[in-house]
Amino acid sequence: MVMATSKNLVTIPEAIAAHKQKSKHIKFIDGSWHMPVGDNPRNARAEFISGPRISGAFYFDIDDIAPVMGSADNPKKLPHMKPSSKLFASAMDQMGISPSDTLYVYATKDCAFHHRAYWTLRSCGHDPSLVKLVQGSLNEWEECGGELEEGQLPEEDERLFRMSDLNWDEKTPTYQVMSDNEDVVVDVDQVLNIVNQKDAADAVIVDARSAGRFVGTAPEPRPGLRGGHMPGALNVPFTDLLDPNDKTKFRPMTEVKDIFIKAGISPISGDDTSCRKIVCSCGSGVTAAALAVGLEECGLRSKEDITIFDGSWIEWGSSDSTPIVSDGK
């Protein structure tokens, strides 16, 4: 349904053309991830190991390239939080990525969650203009004649690293991040401040969860969380932004823009700075990235005006002290 509409969104044929260059400065990264819920959830890392995969690709594990739960950087034990600059740089070193490399992030069939890997790469220190989001799945890549690796990767394959095995915190990485980019995420106190300011706030919160979860009539997939939403938040289910026939693609950006506007996110007019900033939230910080990418790509906001509430509903909904609006009884 969708053709690439920017320099950052690329089609499968465009990605294949880049891969055929065989350049050491072009890297392909499987950014697939799946919700770890249900009786038999998909495991994107295991699928990468078993193959097939794009020839020469690495796997960006958003759960592994993240502060360890319970550590000083993540005392609340929240999943896949934004990595520190040093952790990110250490992961880039392990994947052989240099700051001048162009990165193509792709996903396997029916994966709607690869936006977080793409967002992390662009937000943690790599040149955002050098990170591309492939529109289309690994299946389409194969159908279009893209080069694949088949078969199980051996345990000793360098691409199957775990950050916990590398003693990265005791070493100085060689990869140099562009900036620390600490302001790309907000914490629960900053979100609470926005909520408490109400109409006087200079930012609006946009929630990527389903409408049922947003109003509290549908259960949260993770146990122990209250239902509902933050007071004043808007709801844009991230799936609404995606091609209904292929979740690895966005809808045309004209449609994405209309969806945001109908949800209450107005275009910026002239020097008006009211509600210029957008805070994207979701269940755990993954699908919020789809909102962040969509907002930037459709032209409603610049990258600098978009942040992600990294703790998202896992943090907000598990607290007894945060305000919640709910239709559920």
Image (cartoon, grey):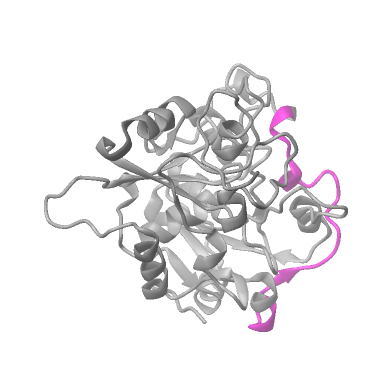
In the foreground, 232 or 102: 232
In the foreground, 241 or 221: 221
Residue 124 shown left or right of residue 209 in the figure: left
> Residue shown at 16%/57% (left/top)?
269
185 in relation to 24, above or below: above
**Name of the residue lying farthest toward the front:** 329
Residue 180 in sight here: no
In the foreground, 109 or 280: 280
Q: What secondary structure do most residues of the magenta stretch adopt? A: loop
Residue 18 shown left or right of residue 244 in the figure: left
> Residue shown at 36%/67% (left/top)?
257
Which stretch is magenta? 142-164
Residue 45 shown left or right of residue 207 in the figure: right
> Residue shown at 68%/83% (left/top)?
143
Spot occupied by residue 173 in the image (x, y as percentages of width and height) = 53, 29
Q: Is residue 243 magenta?
A: no
283 in relation to 266, above or below: above
Screen quadrant of the C terminus: top right
> Residue shown at 54%/23% (left/top)?
321
Q: Is residue 152 magenta?
A: yes
Spot occupied by residue 118 in the image (x, y as percentages of width and height) = 52, 53
172 in relation to 284, above or below: above
178 in relation to 328, above or below: above
Spot occupied by residue 294 in the image (x, y as percentages of width and height) = 43, 61
Task: Name the image quarter holding residue 274.
Answer: top left
| Total marks in image | 0
Spot occupied by residue 21 in the image (x, y as percentages of width and height) = 52, 70
In the foreground, 186 or 31: 186
Residue 87 in sight here: yes
